[in-house]
């Protein structure tokens, strides 16, 4: 298959409207013996809408095909033409054009055929008879026995051409295996035939409009219908939510979930208003979970997020949002990482229409929309997800231990199976085509790349990435995923979350890499958490901080970094020292005081920690001060293009004074991490002689600081003295636990 075919399964699989007044359903279930669609539209009958016999019902590869005919309304007669088509989407308000089949054929013949050209169609034997008479004469042999040896085609043609002239379309046998015959065609006649258009357009004139269809037929499966797929398997009958279902809801009584047929009429279908913004040179990503985005103790909706949170994200200065838990999942407390239905937006938050509105409004605000996609494993639930989908244990997943995640109890995909690749690659393309998603963060890539699920020690030795524990099929899937996404959607962004730092993670696929645009530097957040939890403030190592933040300068510009804490200096250095992407989780920007805990049996299904306390921003204090600093930090990148510049020159890293300084473009960053020691005239090297001005100071009163840096100290002139290997230096005041950003305002030539 080519790249388009292997990533467009959603065009065939699942439920689709067909113009010949019917609905088609296709499913892959190689372990099943019988397949039917059951739902409220057919009284949940396992026999009314089932796969027919032979080819169109089931093939040798396990694909089932079911046709659900639209039902005639009372008093209506069936169409005379079995293949009568209806225009369901375009021109839905127009009726039948009134063109009959007889008029269509006459019109086609009059305009397409030249006079006399259709004679041989009406008298099929006239042509062979004339040819026979030309070769053998009017009294030629009548039986095979009477036939003499016939000369080869070329000899016969030359003899005929000598008498009659060259034919407009003569066939000559050249006697070559690779070119058995060739056709000599008159150029003028060929161009005239090529200029004719086939009469396909006339066929469309017989299409009837949507109103004509609604008047005559009832949909075979109406919009909003509940349905499941029914299988007979060696282990007995099964009911499953279709694997390609686009909208799924749990049963209100806690029973088995069901799919909902989502086919709104054209006048009620969502109409996009905005186009995706261009991908910026630096990404400031706001990661969010729709369900916990509200202040109330409940699950928030897509519409709540669209109306209340999106404008706030824009105000906060971010240029992209990354959404967690969008694909349907059974248990809310799993945060959305145990996906059950990969093509369905979670019904907890609203309808597909609501999610399209969220994406559309985000684009209107200039925000890119990324999804945290989970293709590294799937939920093990058999009643909702893909596990034991067709009654067998190895339909979508590996069997035995290989099919189970080592610690999480989830199912592991069989990436080497073409049908599984078809499912997953099409899923990526589906989110982009159907919902105009701008990028993906691939969750827990290490879980899929290794048979030990990434739970092994990695020292950086190349052998650790090239041994028997590497799943080569998973690597091939990731290469195909990036190749397909970037080929068909050039502005797409792909991010890898890989704790093992696989070599070539962000190298182009053409050079043997996996093709990701960014990778998440997970060690940064872990380092900050370790320092804050278990290392005394005065023992923090500046060298370790720098080495972790710039762990590999060769790939540093591909890093996406984040810091899950409320320390201003930590956020500033994490944002400005590394690559072109920074991420913040919802609420962290203002120092949300409580952890996130989803409702589960362990907390009596409480929603008290599954929300965000936005009201804290309305009060003066540390929360609004921290938010003010975070906004100015985002403006620093927006105005000064910090992240999109080249990597910084790290020229000053002192463990004794606990000071870090680096230069990035015209900006000088200075951090004093010491918990108690302040410095009045601390010398930091700079290359350019000139005047420098503080453009960001973490100690300002508006940020909740003490304002120890006076106004006159915001402007500094260089001293001509070699420091840190640079020609000039600044003598600056560094209060303890503060950071300043200086900008070169004027260059002095000496």
Image: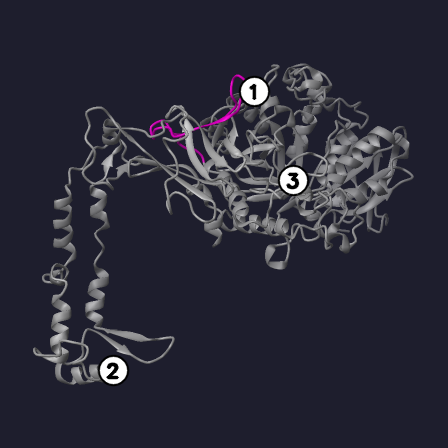
Q: Quadrant of residue 44?
A: top left
Residue shown at 18% from the left, 76% from the top? 167
Q: Residue furthest left?
A: 138
Q: Position of residue 625 (x, y in %)?
A: 71, 22
Secondary structure under the numbered disc 1 in the rendered image: loop
Give the vertical position of 382 relative to 160 (above or below): above
Q: Residue 271 in magenta?
A: yes
Gap in Å between the C-alphas at discs 1 and 2?
80 Å
Q: Is residue 614 above or below residue 344?
A: above
- The range drawn in magenta is 249-274
Instruction: Judge depth for marks 1 and 2 and give the one in front.
Output: 2
Name the colour scheme. one colour
Q: Which residue is mark 3?
A: 640
Q: Earlier in the sequence, mark 1 or mark 2?
A: 2
Task: List the single residue furthest toward the right.
Answer: 656
Residue corresponding to mark 2: 154
Residue 732 appears at what percent x and percent y?
83, 36
Relative height, residue 227 to residue 390 (above, below): above
Q: Secondary structure at mark 2?
A: helix
């Amino acid at each position: 298959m080519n790249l388009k075919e292997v990533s467009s399964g959603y065009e065939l699989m699942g439920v689709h409207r067909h113009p010949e007044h019917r609905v088609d359903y296709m499913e892959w279930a190689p372990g099943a013996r019988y397949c039917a669609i059951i739902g409220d539209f057919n009284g949940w009958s396992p026999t009314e809408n089932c796969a027919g016999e032979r080819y169109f019902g089931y093939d040798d590869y396990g694909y089932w095909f079911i046709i659900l005919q639209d039902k005639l309304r009372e008093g209506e007669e069936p169409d005379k033409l079995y293949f009568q088509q209806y225009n369901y989407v375009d021109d839905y308000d127009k009726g039948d054009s009134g063109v009959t089949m007889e008029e269509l054929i006459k019109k086609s013949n009059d305009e397409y055929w030249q006079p006399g050209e259709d004679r041989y169609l009406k008298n099929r034997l006239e042509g062979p008879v004339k040819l026979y008479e030309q070769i053998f004469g009017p009294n030629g042999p009548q039986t095979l026995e009477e036939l003499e040896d016939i000369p080869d085609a070329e000899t016969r043609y030359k003899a005929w051409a000598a008498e009659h002239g060259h034919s407009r379309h003569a066939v000559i046998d050249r006697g070559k295996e690779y070119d058995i015959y060739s056709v000599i065609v008159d150029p003028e006649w060929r161009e005239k035939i090529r200029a004719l258009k086939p009469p396909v357009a006339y066929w469309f004139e017989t299409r009837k409009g949507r109103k004509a269809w609604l008047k005559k037929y009832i949909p075979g499966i109406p919009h909003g219908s509940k349905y499941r797929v029914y299988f007979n398997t060696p282990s007995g009958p099964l009911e499953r939510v279709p694997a390609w279902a686009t909208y799924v809801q749990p049963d209100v009584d806690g029973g088995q979930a069901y799919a909902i047929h989502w086919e709104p009429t054209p006048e009620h279908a969502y109409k996009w208003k905005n186009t995706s913004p261009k991908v910026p040179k630096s990404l400031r990503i706001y990661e969010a979970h729709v369900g916990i985005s509200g202040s109330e103790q409940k699950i928030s909706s897509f519409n709540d997020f669209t109306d209340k949170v999106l404008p706030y994200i824009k105000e906060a200065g971010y240029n992209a949002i990354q959404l967690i838990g969008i694909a349907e999942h059974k248990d809310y407390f799993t945060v959305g990482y145990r996906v059950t239905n990969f093509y369905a937006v979670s019904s907890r938050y609203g309808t597909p229409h609501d999610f399209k509105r969220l994406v559309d409004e985000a684009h209107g605000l200039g925000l890119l929309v990324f999804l945290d996609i989970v293709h590294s494993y799937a939920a093990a639930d058999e009643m909702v997800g893909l596990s034991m989908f067709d009654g067998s244990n190895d339909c979508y997943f590996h069997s035995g231990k290989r099919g189970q995640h080592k610690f999480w109890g989830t199912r592991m995909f069989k990436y080497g199976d073409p049908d599984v690749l078809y499912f997953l690659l099409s899923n990526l393309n589906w989110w982009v085509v159907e919902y105009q998603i701008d990028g993906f963060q691939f969750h827990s890539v290490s879980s899929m790349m290794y048979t030990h699920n990434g739970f092994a020690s990695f020292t950086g030795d190349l052998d650790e990435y090239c041994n028997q524990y590497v799943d080569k099929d998973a690597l091939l899937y990731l290469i195909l995923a990036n190749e397909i996404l970037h080929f068909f959607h050039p502005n797409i962004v792909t991010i890898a979350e890989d704790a093992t730092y696989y070599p070539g993670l962000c190298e182009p696929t053409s050079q043997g890499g996996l093709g990701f645009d960014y990778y998440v530097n997970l060690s940064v957040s872990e380092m900050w958490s370790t320092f804050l939890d278990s290392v005394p403030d005065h023992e923090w190592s500046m060298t370790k901080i720098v080495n972790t933040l710039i762990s590999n300068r060769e790939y540093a510009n591909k890093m996406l970094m984040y810091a899950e804490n409320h320390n201003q200096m930590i956020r500033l250095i994490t944002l400005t020292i590394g690559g072109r992407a920074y991420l913040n989780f919802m609420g962290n920007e203002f120092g949300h005081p409580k952890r996130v805990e989803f409702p589960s049996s362990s907390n009596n299904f409480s929603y008290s920690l599954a929300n965000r306390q936005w009201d804290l921003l309305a009060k003066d204090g540390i929360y609004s001060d921290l938010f003010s600093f975070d906004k100015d930090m985002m403006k620093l990148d927006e105005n000064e293009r910090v992240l999109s510049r080249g990597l910084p020159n790290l020229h000053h890293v002192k463990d004794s004074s606990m000071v870090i300084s680096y230069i990035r473009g015209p900006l000088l960053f200075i951090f004093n991490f010491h918990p108690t020691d302040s410095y009045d005239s601390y010398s930091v090297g700079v290359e350019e002689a000139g005047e420098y001005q503080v453009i960001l100071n973490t100690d300002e009163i508006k940020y909740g600081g003490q304002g120890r840096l006076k106004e006159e100290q915001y402007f500094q002139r260089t001293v001509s003295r070699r420091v840190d290997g640079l020609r000039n230096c600044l003598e600056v005041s560094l209060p303890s636990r503060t950071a300043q950003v200086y900008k070169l305002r004027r260059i002095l030539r000496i």
